[in-house]
Image (tube, rainbow, N blue to C red):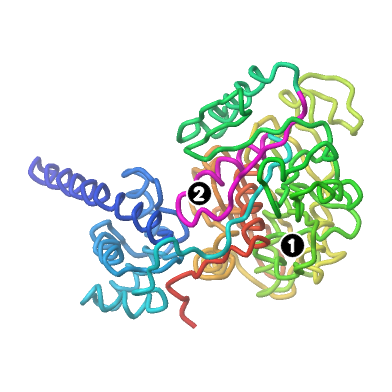
Amino acid sequence: MSQPMLDNVFREWQSSEALAEQMIPLVGRLYRQNNVVATMFGRSLIKQSVIRILKDHRFVRKIEGTELTVEDTFPIVRAMSELSLGPAHVDVGKLAVNFKRQGGGDVEAYLRRELHEIVDAYQPGASTGEPQDVVLYGFGRIGRLLTRVMIEKAGGGNLLRLRAIVVRGRGDVAKDLEKRASLLRRDSVHGPFEGTIDVDVETRTLTVNGNVIQMIYADSPSEIDYTDYGINNAVIVDNTGIWRDEEGLGQHLECKGAAKAILTAPGKGDIKNVVYGINHGDIQEDDQILSAASCTTNAIVPVLKVINDEYGVATGHVETVHAYTNDQNLIDNYHKGDRRGRSAALNMVLTETGAAKAVAKALPELEGKLTGNAIRVPTPNVSMAILNLTLEKGVDAESLNDYLRDMSIHSAYQKQIDFVDSAEVVSSDFVGNRKAGIVDAKATIASDNHAVVYVWYDNEFGYSCQVIRLLQHVSHVSFLKLPHEAG
């Protein structure tokens, strides 16, 4: 390639960077003023860097087979910013691809047609529900990630208000607060927190990106009156895992100011185990205690759902290759569970998983059809589920992958199912992925009535995003999603 051609390629890149830079404040203003969440085929564009925005455009080519540049999307975003839009989730990528396929034309006229439900619907302070007080009971791996996600989402409708975090009592409050803040600020797996954290020892609060969060020290729910802190009708998200039945979790509901409880682990007894996107419609208004099931259950149920809908699942086995967790020992020591006492950092540990049986709670049609095991491996995050399935209809790998790709883009399960088609991806590539599970197309095996599907999942962050979706649902935070899918 000649030097003039090289120079031209670089100038095109610089031009794309410049447009992406102009797009960032427009996306931010739509979010903060109009409560419009702009996405690129399901990937949020809010608070993203120039490079991330450009990478998301390249992602479209992989999943849609069509080139999409920032030159295509910038006019869409600019026109959106001028249309006085009401609250919604708007997929800028899908709008731009459809606009190109229709041959272009008048951008404003196109948007007025595609977004007619929200055009000229702006009202100052408009939102998609009433503000909901939220309390995190526990501040471990999941608790801190839930904090990150809720703080990130606080800039638009500001509906989920993280009001307090409950931790066990400590002697030196000042030192404890600083340590809690430090753990939120720095994370070995998920990287530094994007923002500022201020500690106020006198009021026992953390101010995180302008959100004041009360730290409550208590050894049991019975010690807490949330109304003392101005907290009312709160949803308590228990991420300690100490209580998993109605009796234990019911302690939260006895606290003044508490209305509902969500468990971030599989529930026992008659507690509804909910995989958001699949069976959240089963939740009744009077359900006060809910379980968000497990990270593995959230990862596999959406994929199993769409496969069963199209091909029928006769029988199957789920093998989970799971990152080690805080429940395991760093070096060999006593543990009440079989094998989990052996060093997590040095061994693959074969253990049990309830995920296969738990599938039936979200998908009753698969009850008794699945078995499962788990292998804990020496990685700190990101796991994989291998779905070894006997189907009722014949299928080949190409058609199965095409179907799963389509489900990841154009179905109601877009937030739950992601899709990757690369021979080079490894577990660390999925740290921070917000989907419940990611189908690895290159690993798919299928012939006749047999299929093996590999599903990656960030067992910490992806699961936390599912918990947030469930939390939004029980809080009646709903989002109009545009454009509507064809058909």
Residue 48 rendering spot, x and y as whole percentages: 38, 46
User: Against 88, is 228 above or below?
Assistant: above
Indicate the amino acid at tag 2: Ala
Indicate the amino acid at tag 1: Leu
On whether residue 410 falls in the magenta region, the answer is no
Label 2 sits on a secondary structure element that is: helix
What is the quadrant of the N terminus in the image?
top left
At x 31%, y 61%, the residue is: 67
The residue beneath circle 1 is: 389
Tally the numbered discs. Answer: 2
Q: Quadrant of residue 226?
A: top right
Residue 244 rendering spot, x and y as whole percentages: 85, 47
The residue beneath circle 2 is: 154
Kindly indicate whether the residue at mark 2 contacts the one at mark 1 (C-beta within 8 angstroms). no
In the foreground, 121 or 323: 121
Residue 324 rendering spot, x and y as whole percentages: 72, 33
At x 83%, y 19%, the residue is: 332
Mark 1 surroundings within 10 Å by alpha-carbon count, few (fewer than 14), some (14 through 19), many (20 or more): many
Mark number for residue 159?
A: none
In the foreground, 237 or 486: 237
Q: Which span is picked out in magenta?
A: 140-169
* Upstream in sequence: badge 1 or badge 2: 2
On whether residue 155 falls in the magenta region, the answer is yes
At x 75%, y 44%, the residue is: 238
Cα gap from disc 1 to disc 2, whole angstroms: 41 Å
Label 1 sits on a secondary structure element that is: strand
Mark 2 surroundings within 10 Å by alpha-carbon count, few (fewer than 14), some (14 through 19), many (20 or more): some
Q: Is residue 250 left or right of residue 274?
A: right
In the foreground, 200 or 390: 200
At x 75%, y 67%, the residue is: 283
Residue 150 rendering spot, x and y as whole percentages: 56, 46
Q: Is residue 486 left or right of residue 23?
A: right
